[in-house]
Amino acid sequence: MARTALCFSQCSAIEAICSSSSVPEIGILGLGYIGLPLTLAFAKKNSVFGFDINLNRVSNLKKGIDSNKEFSAKEIIKNKNIVFTSDIYQLRKCTIFIVTV
């Protein structure tokens, strides 16, 4: 039951941010089991910077490779609203930060 509540609250937060009248730049810090799904969900409606300190992880995601095997290359690459990066300075544009580490 707690898991259902967690999923519901995550969906509500995503919908609230995505329906805002201003267009936020979202920075998601950490692209693991929580960060990557959030990045993909937010990127359906907003510009998202997915940040991770693991250079190999970022490089693979740019190629559509998810080492956690949760998402296909098609799911990762098809979304043009995502910038995968390990460069902290690219996050300067962001107005919302979500830390998932």
Image (tube, rainbow, N blue to C red):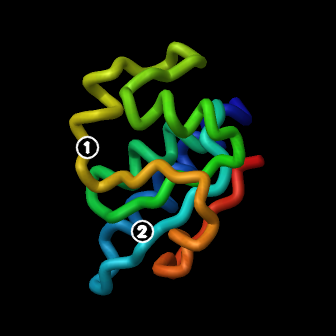
Which kind of residue does numbered mark 2 sit on? Ala
Disc 1 on helix, strand or loop? loop
Q: Residue at x 77, y 47 (%)?
A: 101
Q: Position of residue 7 (x, y in %)?
A: 57, 40
Q: Amino acid at mark 1?
A: Asn
- Residue 53 in the figure: left or right of residue 39: right
Q: Residue at the spot x=31%, y=79% of the render?
A: 23
How far from the left and from the top, in percent, is residue 52? 65, 47
Residue 49 or residue 21, whichever sits in front? 49
Secondary structure state at the residue bearing disc 2: helix
Q: Which of the pair 41/51 is nearer the observer?
A: 51
State how many labels appear: 2
Q: Is residue 25 above or below residue 79?
A: below
Q: Position of residue 18 (x, y in %)?
A: 34, 66
Whether 77 is drawn above or below 8: the answer is above
Residue corresponding to mark 2? 16
Q: Are marks 1 and 2 in contact (CB under 8 Å)?
A: no
Compare residues 64 and 45 and report the one nearer the observer: 64
Q: Which residue is mark 1?
A: 79
Compute the Cα span from label 1 to label 2: 20 Å
Q: Residue lying at the far bottom in this picture: please name it.
A: 22
Local crowd at mark 1 within 10 Å, few (<14), some, or many (≥20)? Answer: some
Q: Is residue 40 left or right of residue 67?
A: left
Q: Any mark on residue 37, and which?
A: none
Single out the mark in the foreground, 1 or 2. Answer: 1
Please identify the quadrant where the N terminus is shown: top right
Residue 69 is at least partly visible in this image: yes
Is residue 5 shown to the viewer in this render? no
Name the N-terminal-most of marks 1 and 2: 2
- Picture coordinates of residue 4 (x, y %)? 61, 34
Q: Residue at x 24, y 49 (%)?
A: 80
